[in-house]
């Protein structure tokens, strides 16, 4: 709002809602409502008038609902922006650092390792600010599977006992035992789902009998945690 007092003696001082006078006749950042503006001249003459301040254009952002991703995956942060004057300045922050592809762009790629809150602060050319916040949860999948049976009969189907799991998971060691605890097979340091790294049902080059055998695994997941797994599998001939 702005006010003048023509025909009186300068300098003039101004007040909004009679809350103290100053020579500044511009008042900024006012919520929309009706205000009383007072003007006083050098002789102490004072007048007042009412000024209605209307709402400006809408300026807001919406980062959407909170989301969940799988550990190791990325997510594109894509805000919906309403209003704003001129060029918008983007300022992204996370509750911990190092997860965003950029912090001053409209749509950064995020790759958090554990739960995180992201905030976006938008500034337009009028100095107006819009803000929103989003939480991303991170789920860690620890699924490794060894088939309950296999048939090493050279038919190109289930001929090897393989270790299956989420890509990026490593097998630090893989051992096969008979029911007396004798080691029949050992392998180490390979990725899950490798069709060439598994037990072919032999020991020292000779086929072993059909039956139930015990396996033991030491697994390293893509978050560097490790786990030991064990179970049984049936060799079918």
Image (cartoon, grey):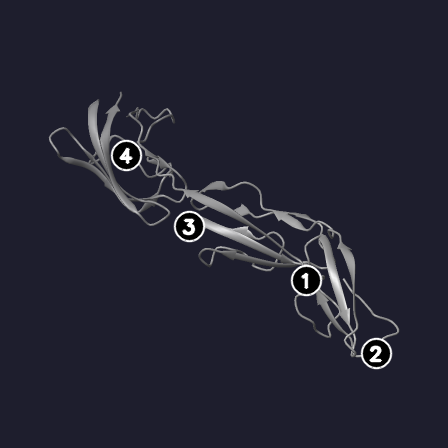
Q: What residue lies at 20% left-to-right and 28% top-to-bottom?
A: 213
Instruction: Classify mark 1: helix, strand or loop.
Output: loop
The reply to whether discs 4 and 3 touch (Cβ–Cβ < 8 Å) is no
Question: In the displayed image of the protein, which residue is found farthest to the left?
Answer: 180
CB under 8 Å between discs 3 and 1: no
Q: Marks 1 and 4, how far apart in space? A: 67 Å
Q: In what quadrant of the picture does the C terminus appear?
A: top left
Which of the marked residues, 4 or 3, is nearer the chain's N terminus? Answer: 3
Kindly report the distance in space between the C-alpha atoms of the residues bearing marks 3 and 1: 35 Å
Q: List the residue tagged with mark 2.
A: 9
Mark 2 and 4 residues: CB-CB less than 8 Å, in contact? no
Q: Earlier in the sequence, mark 1 or mark 4?
A: 1
Where 102 falls versus 77 (above or below)? Answer: below
Of badges 2 and 4, nearer the viewer stands 2
Q: Image quadrant for the N terminus?
A: bottom right
Which residue has dot 4 on it?
A: 199
CA distance for labels 4 and 3: 34 Å
Marks 2 and 4 sit apart, C-alpha to C-alpha, by 101 Å
Quick one: label 3 or label 1, which is nearer the N terminus? Answer: 3
Q: Percent from the top left, x then y, of residue 228?
A: 24, 40
Circle 1 crowding by C-alpha within 10 Å: few under 14, some 14–19, many from 20: few
| Residue that carries the numbered disc 3 in the rendered image | 113
**Which residue in the rendered view is the most extreme toward the top?**
237
Viewer-proximal residue, 101 or 210?
101
Residue at (71% x, 52% y) in the render? 33
Q: Give x and y (percent) for residue 216.
A: 22, 37
Q: How many marks?
A: 4
């Amino acid at each position: 709002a702005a006010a003048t007092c023509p025909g009186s003696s300068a300098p003039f001082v101004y007040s909004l809602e009679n809350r103290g006078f100053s020579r500044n006749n511009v008042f900024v950042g006012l919520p929309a409502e009706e205000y009383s503006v007072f003007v006083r001249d050098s002789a102490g003459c004072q007048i007042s008038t009412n000024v209605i301040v209307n709402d400006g254009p809408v300026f807001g952002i919406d980062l959407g609902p909170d989301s969940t991703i799988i550990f190791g995956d990325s997510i594109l942060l894509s805000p919906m922006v309403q209003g704003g004057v001129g060029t918008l300045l983007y300022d992204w922050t996370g509750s911990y650092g190092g997860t965003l592809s950029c912090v001053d762009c409209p749509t950064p790629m995020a790759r958090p390792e554990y739960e995180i809150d992201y905030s976006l602060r938008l500034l337009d050319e009028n100095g107006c600010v819009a803000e929103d916040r989003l939480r991303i949860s991170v789920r860690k999948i620890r699924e490794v599977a060894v088939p309950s049976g296999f048939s090493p009969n050279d038919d190109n189907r289930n001929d090897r006992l393989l270790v299956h799991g989420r890509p990026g998971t490593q097998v630090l060691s893989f051992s096969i035992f008979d029911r007396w605890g004798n080691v029949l097979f050992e392998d180490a340091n390979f990725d899950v789902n490798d069709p060439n790294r598994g037990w072919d049902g032999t020991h020292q080059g000779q086929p072993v009998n059909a039956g139930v055998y015990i396996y033991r695994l030491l697994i390293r997941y893509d978050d560097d945690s490790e786990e030991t797994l064990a179970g049984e599998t049936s060799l079918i001939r």
